[in-house]
Amino acid sequence: MLRKFFVVTTFVCLIFNPLIGSAQLPDFTQLVEQTSAAVVKINTVQKARKGKSAQMEPGQIPEIFRDLFQQRQRPQTQRPVLAMGSGFVISDDGYIITNHHVIDGADEIVVRFSDRREFTAQVVGKDRRSDLALLKVEATDLPTLKLAAPDQLKVGEWVLAIGSPFGLDYSASVGIVSAIGRSIPTEKGENYVPFIQTDVAINPGNSGGPLFNLDGEVVGINSQIYSRSGGSIGLSFAIPTSVAVGVIEQLKENGEVQRGWLGVVIQDVDKDLARSLDLDRPQGALINAVEPDSPADKGGIKPGDVIVSFNRQPIVDSGDLPHVVGMLVPGKKAPVELYRKGKRKKMTIEVGSLKGDDANVAGRGDGTDRLGLAIADLSAREMSSLGIRGGVVIEQVSPDSAGSESGLSRGDVILQLGYSRIDDIEEYDQVVRELPVDTPVLIRFYRQGRAISRTIVLTK
């Protein structure tokens, strides 16, 4: 009897304990009612492209099968590609924030509100490095959301997301902030966003939607999930407003984003490296290489230096450095503190400008040039690894373009066009401007360490 009484008493105490009782949990109903009208569903369409099947010479095909193969070799039309995501309105005259990857490559963007109104949106600007895009619809008096003040978010704080996971419109999910300042490099190794990590249930379709604090302010833009199954497992990442504010302002004014650039190759400092560098603890960003004539080179930074503060912001891990540098306006002079041979040293560095995503000859209206290519310069490290002195790397190949017809791919490094050697973007742009129409031109490029020569024909 005593044992039963103890169990029952304990259970009753758990129910009425004010520290963990349900009465202490936030009520999100009012927050959802006040904000959901400004959250939008984004549907995109990438129009069908005409493709070509593999070609075979007639003499290679037995006569009995020749009619069948000729039918298969006719141009085939692919189906349109449909995709969806989320976004939210930041001004009543129709400006909308979403993710870059939600609208990238889209030929048509339709924005749908909770009251079932639909608008066709235009892209004001987009930024791959931060995964943000700014859209505009022709409408007035729209409901809007407010961006929270930067750097006010704390780990453990309640947050709420609204979006369209798997196309289920205007779904709400809640959780807490698990961590801030997470470094998640892109597939190109770039790292300019100190992500907010949460355990909010985020799934495909939530991308570009808002992450709210309990005051109904947007603290982040949902961008990524970590998942082995494609669905939420409690690891989601959002772009903080500290990044979004500056990016959106630049997109609105210029249609593109300029970032600070230092020109260094960095890595973390572990316990053994800290001891060998006479540091009292593992900290900072270790400089492994300095690009010639870069802002770091001109400012006196050397390989082996360990940067522990940049622009008066502490650099705890190496991933903190690109976060800080990328947020600075090119040309800004920033104070730097570093360790060199065990001694603390102070200096001032003038931050350079990181080249944009689409540094190429304009011409096709989709960020590619006359050949249907978007290209970028190679870093000194990339050239060294390939054993070359110059060249430009392909970042995008437009379908149905001269580049596509020649079999060029993203990641190929162009070394020669016609009789002209290509060392950088400036030389590439000049050659592309002067290319003749309907004339085969030699193009030599590197792919996976192997030099390849082909011809490319500009048709218009």
Image: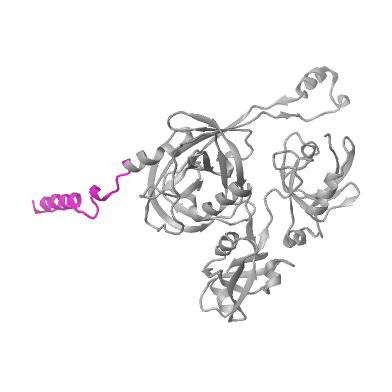
Q: Which residue shows up at 16% across the image and 53% down it?
A: 13
**Residue that lies at the very extreme toward the right in this rendered image:** 419
Of 276 and 107, nearer the camera is 107
**Residue that lies at the very extreme toward the left in this rendered image:** 1
Spot occupied by residue 431 in the image (x, y as percentages of width and height): 85, 48
Spot occupied by residue 399 in the image (x, y as percentages of width and height): 72, 35
Spot occupied by residue 266 in the image (x, y as percentages of width and height): 63, 66
| Range drawn in magenta | 1-29
How many discs mark residues in the rendered view? 0
Residue 451 visible to an observer of this rendering: no
Taking the magenta stretch, the answer to whether it contains residue 46 is no
Residue 10 visible to an observer of this rendering: yes
Of 104 and 64, nearer the camera is 104
Of 402 and 218, nearer the camera is 218
Query: On the picture, is 234 further left or further right than 428?
Result: left
Chief secondary structure of the magenta span?
helix
Q: Which residue shows up at 64% across the image and 38% down it?
A: 105
Image quarter hosting the C terminus: top right
From what the image shows, is residue 342 above or below residue 72? below
Query: On the picture, is 244 further left or further right than 178?
Result: right
Q: In which quarter of the image is residue 410?
A: top right
From what the image shows, is residue 44 above or below residue 333? above
Q: Which residue shows up at 38% across the image and 47% down it?
A: 216
Spot occupied by residue 121 in the image (x, y as percentages of width and height): 57, 35
Q: Which residue shows up at 51% across the image and 34% down it?
A: 139
Query: On the picture, is 447 further left or further right than 168?
Result: right
